[in-house]
Amino acid sequence: MAQLTVGSAIAKARALLIASGVPAQEAETTARCIVASDRWGIGSHGLMRLPFYLARLQAGGIKASAKLKVVTDLPSLVIFDGDDGLGHWQLQKGAEVAAERAQKNGIAAVGIGRSNHCGALGIYVWPMINKGLVGIAFSTGPAVMPPWGGNSTLLSTSPIAAGIPTDPPTVIDLATSAVARGKIQAKAQAGAELEPGWAFTKDGAPTTDAKEALAGMLAPLGGVKGYAIAVLVESLTGMLIGPTLAKNIPDMFAADQDRKSQEISHFIIAIDAAKLSVDGENSRTTDFAEYVAGAGGRLPGSNRVNPESLNGDDEITFTDQVADQLAQWSSKLGI
């Protein structure tokens, strides 16, 4: 396994993105979001993904110079056209806008269409948490799940994230498939087998082979209930924001599709937690956190580091294969 400090990893990712034409501020935000995933222990959404982003930037599937374009601007609703840009900085900006509007209006929603993969979705509820707000986020991606009882893919992993300003903060971040597809890719790179029940071949047979799973289908989380939640996510993203349904989104892991725009959509909601209370009392979040600890448990995501205050001296680990790929890109881009 390879190791880097958080600060060095951010600097490396930022330099590679800038060398690929991404403006400095957007490259910095994207690099921090990528490395935050590794710091959280979600390597499948961290530096492992960077070579795929770089390939898509080089091929034109991701537009390096993209700008967020306002489509709708109401007091509590903003819709952006992402102009085929990187999803990380775009969703971070969307979350900041949602938080600002919710502080003024009690609740706000921001949608971003025509974007790209954003990494670990849970990162983007922190702009809300840090302001004492509730944050909820949804995103879409390439179709990898069939409808319940179906035999062809129509739904993405349909991730959902939520942040609640408890102490410590609650961060829920999950795919509505049995597993995130990035974890399948990580298993494929490592030559490791999958857990039974995660995936199917393209013919619908259960498989533990990661490469077969990448070419096949993923199972929904919790059977028909996971499928129903995935439909909700697809409704709030691809169907309503658009411009593309999961069925038509190119696969970022397929090199022959690097030139194609993914046109992914994201949706984020911010709610002023202090304005929700029927009795003006806001101590129940603290009470619940204490009850969870007293019962011997912990809140979801409570051990995750705030991505907006990463310690540059902390270390992250990633596979030697990822390290080799980053070295090759550094050489290719003259870094």
Image: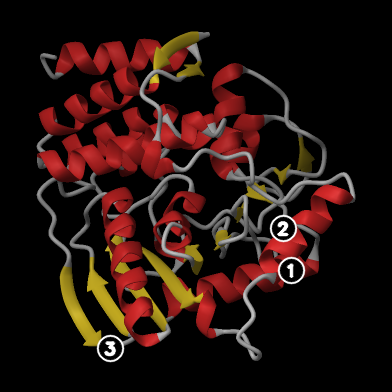
Three-letter code, disc 3: Pro
Left or right position of 6 against 56: right
Marks 3/1: CA–CA distance: 38 Å
Q: Nearer the viewer, mark 3 or mark 2?
A: 3
Per the model, the C-alpha gap separating discs 3 and 2 is 36 Å
Give the tally of numbered discs.
Answer: 3
What numbered label is drawn on residue 75? 3
Q: Are the two marked residues, 2 and 1, in contact with CB atoms closer than 8 angstroms?
A: yes
Please name whichever residue, 16 or 269, is drawn nearer the observer in this view of the structure. 269
Q: Amino acid at mark 1?
A: Trp
Residue at the (80%, 62%) spot, across then down: 223
Tell me where residue 324 appears, x and y as whole percent: 37, 10
Quick one: label 3 or label 2, which is nearer the N terminus? 3
Residue annotated with mark 2 = 220
Mark 2 is on which residue type? Pro
Q: What separation in Å lies between label 2 and label 1 (alpha carbons)?
A: 8 Å
* Disc number for residue 58: none
Residue at 72% from the left image edge and 25% from the top image edge: 193
Label 1 residue SS: loop
Q: Of circles 3 and 1, which is in front?
A: 3
Q: In the figure, 306 relative to 85: above or below?
A: above
Quarter occupied by the C terminus? top left
- Image depth: mark 2 or mark 1 in front: 2
Question: Outermost residue, right direction?
Answer: 295
Q: Which residue is mark 1?
A: 148
Q: Secondary structure at mark 3?
A: loop
